[in-house]
Amino acid sequence: SQTIHQWPATLVQPVGSPLSLECTVEGTSNPNLYWYRQAAGRGLQLLFYSVGIGQISSEVPQNLSASRPQDRQFILSSKKLLLSDSGFYLCAWGTSGYNEQFFGPGTRLTVL
Amino acid sequence: AQSVAQPEDQVNVAEGNPLTVKCTYSVSGNPYLFWYVQYPNRGLQFLLKYITGDNLVKGSYGFEAEFNKSQTSFHLKKPSALVSDSALYFCAVGPNDYKLSFGAGTTVTVRA
């Protein structure tokens, strides 16, 4: 069966510090990978998605970047965090066709 | 363009009563429709999907949803709600270039 991992689970970082969040998927090959941010426990904002190694599509211009160095690894990064980067970050994987997506447990990021 | 609307921010029901969470969609072509549930500080869990076929779809935890093409709706239902069904529910529609469009979410509270 497929599983998706995210770490860390929680993170508190000062403004201006760098960020690296990691997501890995097991049990599937060539998944589509997604990063979402959820603010205030409500709607989901799609940040990035990837349909293959090295292929990244950005949905919203912002302070963040994403990379996919391996087939089942997706990394969310920032060089300098802003207060507005605080939120709950969710990684998801899906398959082409029906676009069904499966979500990881999330990372709670607090920027102080 | 595709979109989803969840007209109710909050739904409150008594345990044992029927539960309905509403969703309407807008998409060109045939829609792929999904329901997810999110418990506090957790990732989204997939409940059910409609791709084609029978308009009544059965999913996890006793939930079902009815696809209505003429009303462009995909309402989530449960005949007898449990306190443990209290959570945030998201409707989503695809496909669109590998992406899903999520609704803003509906908070369900089931009182004992």
Image: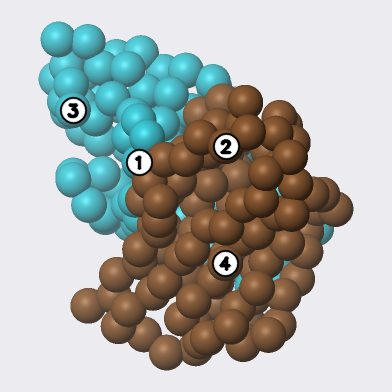
Asked if labels 1 and 3 share a chain, the reply is yes
Inter-mark Cα distance, 3 to 4: 33 Å
Rendered residue at 37%/23% (across/down):
B108
* Secondary-structure class at tag 4: strand
- Residue B105 in the image: state x and y as whole percent: 52, 33
Contact between marks 3 and 4 (CB within 8 A): the answer is no
The residue under label 3 is which amino acid type?
Answer: Ser
Chain letter of disc 3 in the image: B
Rendered residue at 71%/82% (across/down):
A55
Asked if labels 2 and 1 share a chain, the reply is no
* Residue designated by label 4: A75
Considering the image in quadrants, where does the C terminus of chain A appear?
Answer: top right
Q: Is residue B106 above or below residue B76?
A: above
Contact between marks 1 and 4 (CB within 8 A): the answer is no
* Secondary-structure class at tag 3: helix
Inter-mark Cα distance, 1 to 4: 19 Å
* Residue designated by label 1: B42
- Of residues B91 and A35, the one nearer the viewer is A35
The residue under label 4 is which amino acid type?
Answer: Ile
Q: Which mark sits nearer the N-terminus, 1 or 3? A: 1
* Secondary-structure class at tag 2: strand
Determine if residue B12 is in view.
yes
Write down the colour of chain A: brown
Chain drawn in cyan: B
Q: Is residue A10 above or below residue A93?
A: above
